[in-house]
Amino acid sequence: MEIVWAPWRLSYVSKVGKVDTGCFICRAYEDSSEKDRENLLLFRGEKALVILNKFPYNTGHLMVCPVRHTGDFLSLLPEELAEIDELLKRSIRVLKAAYNPDGFNVGLNLGRASGGSVDTHIHYHVVPRWNGDTNFLPVTAGVKVIPQSLEETYDTLKKMWRELYDV
C-alpha cells in the first residue's frame, strides 16, 4: 500500500460530525484584518467576502460568501447578490491571472442533503480546473494531490488581487 501524507486534513477529519462552536466565515470577517492570512480571507467587501477553502478540491479553490450569516439563499438581498456576482467575476479573473486554468467549476450547495458541509452560511465555490487534473488517484485510491500549500496559494492570490484591483 502506498501512503500519501496530507497532515493538514487532520484538523478537518477530527471535527467532522462534531458540534461546531461558530461560523468560521463570520469569525474570519469579524477578526482583525491583521489575521486575514491566518484566516485565509482574501478580500473584505461591504456585503460579501472572498476566502480560500481550507479543504480545497484544487489549488486556488475559493469561496465567495455574503458577510451576513444566512443559510437561506432566498433571503439574500439584491445588494448582497450584486456584490457576490462582482466578487465571483473578480475571483475568476484573479485565478486566471495567477494560475491560467483551463476552466472553472462555480456553484453552491444548498442544505446538508446537497453535499454542503457548511449549510448555515451561503458560500459559492470557485474551483479552477485544468485539463487532466483528475487522474486514477481520486478514482481508485480516493486520493487527491494539491501541489501548493494554502499559505503559498493565499500569498499568490493576495498579490494578484492587489495587482488587479489595487486593494
Image: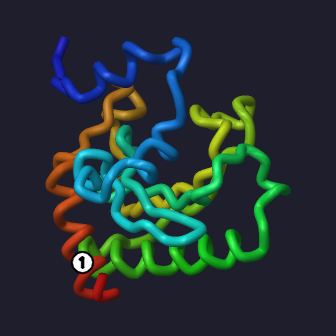
Left or right of residue 24: residue 132: left
Q: How is the image coloured?
A: rainbow
Looking at the image, the residue that sits furthest to the right is 74
At mark 1, the secondary structure is helix
Left or right of residue 76: residue 158: left
Residue sitting at 78 percent across and 74 percent down?
A: 78
Q: Amino acid at mark 1?
A: Met
Question: Residue 23 location in percent, x, y?
Answer: 53, 36
Question: Residue 110 location in percent, x, y?
Answer: 73, 44
Residue sitting at 84 percent across and 56 percent down?
A: 74
Q: Is residue 107 above or below residue 6?
A: below
> How many numbered circles are shown?
1
Question: Residue 117 location in percent, x, y?
Answer: 58, 32
**Res. 147 visible in picture:** no
Tell me where residue 90 sits by quadrant: bottom left
Tell me where residue 8 sits by quadrant: top left
Looking at the image, which is closer to me, 151 or 31? 31
Tell me where residue 56 sits by quadrant: top left
Residue sitting at 70 percent across and 30 percent down?
A: 112
Q: Is residue 18 above or below residue 89?
A: above
Looking at the image, which is closer to me, 147 or 163? 163
Question: Residue 3 location in percent, x, y?
Answer: 17, 18
Q: Quadrant of the N terminus?
A: top left
* Residue that carries the numbered disc 1 in the rendered image: 160
Label 1 packing within 10 angstroms: few (<14), some (14-19), many (20+): some
**Res. 49 visible in picture:** yes
Q: Is residue 150 above or below residue 96?
A: above
Looking at the image, which is closer to me, 167 or 136? 167
Left or right of residue 98: residue 63: right
Q: Quadrant of the C terminus?
A: bottom left
Q: Is residue 159 above or below residue 109?
A: below
